[in-house]
Amino acid sequence: MAPAMLPPVRREMRERLSESGKALASVARNPNIRRVELSWLLSIAGQWSYIIALAVYAYGQGGAAAVGLVGVIRLLPAAIAAPFASGLGDRYPRERVLVIAGVLRTLAMGLAAAAVFAGSPSGLVYLLAGLENLVATVFRPLQGALLPQLADTPEELTAANLGFATIESVGIFAGPALGGVLLATTSTGVVFTVTAGIYGVAALLMMRVRAERPVEPAPTEGVLRDAFAGFVAIGRDANLRLLIGLYGAQTLVAGALNVLIVVSALELLDLGDSGVGFLNSAVGIGGLVGALVSIMLVGRQRLASDFAYGLVLWGVPIAVIGIFPHTPLAIFMLGVVGIGVTVVDVAAVTLLQRVVADDVLARVFGVLQSIFVTTIGLGAIISPLLIDVIGIRWTLVATGALLPVLSALLWRRLRALDSEATVPTELALLRRVPLFRPLPAAQIDQLAGSLIPVRAAGGDEIIRQGEHGDRFYVVGSGQVDVNSDGAKIATLGPGEYFVEIALLRDVPRTATVVATTATTLYALERDEFLSAITGHPASAEAANAVVASRLAGLRPGVASV
């Protein structure tokens, strides 16, 4: 790169880091997000500690096949229930549903601990593990749907997702390490007991979370339509299918990796039981490094490309372990996998929150959770079969190659998705409009993506007096004159808007708007405008206040502009 190019690049890097820092600081100041994230940290650490203990317990009962069987028992019922159970988050306050699920999860884990201490049959322990995971099915969908209610800006939403991914990495590190230490010094029953206590504290934290922008319950369309609304939303959107399909491929590899780490630690690398926890911890440590990398994603529009890069980081290191099975290299490569975990989670979850309507968001995340659970279970089934046929080393190579190959094949479609991303100018314009400020950040993102650019030369007529109002307009650049009955009554510039009263009151326009200079406007179709404003109580209240102010302060001729 030429020296002349360095200052602008450095300046851009500084600006992006500054923007990221501000967004992360705003997340730190948000008490609701802090509580949700701390609760998630405890939950994920407890869960991974328990998963490690359960995997070792199952391996002792029946080898690699038993580890795969446990994966199926834990995940299959959850895969079936996730799309429907997550619908509770579109009907009731999401934070309350999470509290109830946390309490039930604590009870299930406590019973599993009691079963282990009592020497109950392994089948009962596996059944209770499946029950615990069934209840936990609602956590990821509802947390993903809750964050847009708690975040104030799109940047804060991305930063909150980064916080969750970082916390998950900490949990993936701390949980297996805790499980490994406890297994080395105590027993499976003790690990289960500690996990139950951790879950209980996480539920207590969620009790203090209050969504300041509650979501209006989605209109009931019948039991079956409501239950399958998430599937319908995905089926209608090719971009959603692309993202969720690739995300599902990643979790297929994750399910296989859960088994491969156990077998690699015990057979390939000869690290013993505690080595299972330590190898998983390497993934968590890599996730922390990935959090530093992902800071650059805050405010970025090209998240689909970042998602693809994360998938490559997920797969290549697994293949390398199969080719060069040495303990230090395996730990390092699993750390690189951890970086990919964070990048994938931040990019994909933020993309989904931006493009999915809020009243169906929990159910779409529920479908995603079902796909996750199903593919993790499939990975857990397929990997022991591959190990039997081609051995652990070639299974690692084949598993690791999947994601890079898919990313290469679908690279053009992902780049095309990036090209459709909302530009910051449009987002900034909508944030300045008082009617939209109360809306969740993700919904403003969606509206910005629906804006239609309209360009007018000086003297061009944009709307005419007496016409029916069919669009809402925001001035992007230039200026326009508002004329009623031949007299100029207002001049509007960048960030100002018009036609909201005609749409909200359903009356004809009683003024003409003409561009006075070369002007760029952004238009929002009537149905999208009304759906956003009238479907959100705080935004409707703000709209009524604007209408009242304009009606009181302007001549009657401008009232319906």
Image (cartoon, rainbow, N blue to C red):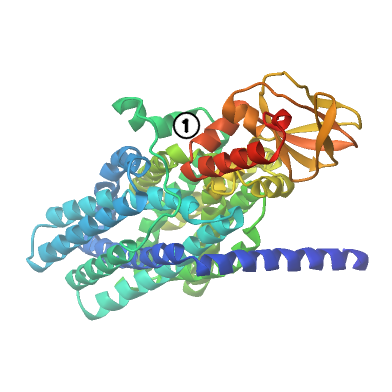
For the point 47% across and 31% down, the residue is 233
Q: Is residue 61 visible?
A: no
Residue 339 position by quadrant: bottom right
Q: Residue furthest bottom?
A: 185
What residue did someone put label 1 on?
233
Q: Position of residue 380 (x, y in %)?
A: 35, 50
Q: Amino acid at mark 1?
A: Ala
Q: Position of residue 123 (x, y in %)?
A: 14, 53
Of 43 and 507, nearer the camera is 507
Residue 38 position by quadrant: bottom left
Q: Is residue 256 above or below residue 531?
A: below
Of 121 and 142, nearer the camera is 142
Q: Is residue 10 visible?
A: yes
Mark 1, secondary structure of its residue: helix
For the point 51% across and 50% down, the residue is 349
Q: Position of residue 472 (x, y in %)?
A: 67, 32
For the point 57% across and 69% down, the residue is 25
Q: Position of residue 532 (x, y in %)?
A: 54, 36
- Density class for disc 1 (Cα within 10 Å; few <14, some 14-19, many ≥20) is some
